[in-house]
Amino acid sequence: MNNGSMTKAELVEEVSRVSDLTKKHSEVIVDTVFKSIIDALHRGEKIELRGFGSFRLRRREPRKGRNPKTGDKVDVPPKKVPYFKPGKELKELINKEPEPAPVVPPPPAVAGSDLAGV
């Protein structure tokens, strides 16, 4: 990952690595998942992924805005915005302390393996 964020290409690569699929097959899977979520939201459906979270639409009411360049007041129309609510398991996993790496003892010294004369 770069700068604390994962790109779509890196996600495809991770799916490929974990599943032993080609990158092309992994890209089709990732694209299909994203497209399915977008299509369901477009139809007004809620997507629930147990243990991960849910996607839904929220409606923003119309409001008065301001053009930052001119300062003029403008009408901002109502719109729908996607919203993700993380699930309980995801929150717990994110906030869980990482397990310490197991301590591997050094190999025992073998008699006559003194490298002082090298």
Image: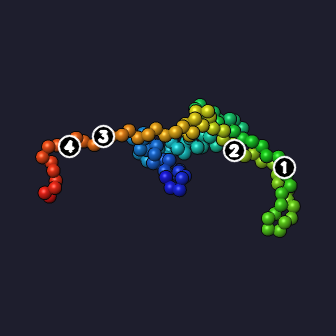
Above or below 84: residue 7: below
Q: Are marks 4 and 2 in contact (CB under 8 Å)?
A: no
Judge depth for marks 4 and 1 and give the one in front: 4
On residue 62, the disc is 1
Q: Quadrant of residue 69?
A: bottom right
Residue 43 visible at all: no
Judge depth for marks 4 and 2 and give the one in front: 4
Circle 1 crowding by C-alpha within 10 Å: few under 14, some 14–19, many from 20: few
Callout 4: SS: loop
How far apart marks 4 and 3 lie (CA) works out to: 12 Å
Circle 2 crowding by C-alpha within 10 Å: few under 14, some 14–19, many from 20: few
How far apart marks 3 and 2 lie (CA) works out to: 51 Å
On residue 82, the disc is 2
> Taking 64 as reference, is 107 left or right?
left
Image point (59%, 31%), residue name: 50
Image point (49%, 52%), residue name: 1
Callout 2: SS: strand
Residue under circle 3?
105
| Label whose residue precedes the other's in the sequence (4 or 1) | 1
How far apart marks 4 and 2 lie (CA) works out to: 61 Å
> Taking 32 as reference, is 111 left or right?
left
Q: Amino acid at mark 4?
A: Ala
Residue 114 visible at all: yes
Percent position of residue 61, x then y: 82, 46
Image point (72%, 41%), residue name: 57
**Foreground of the two, 113 or 48:** 113
| Label whose residue precedes the other's in the sequence (3 or 2) | 2
Above or below 35: residue 46: above
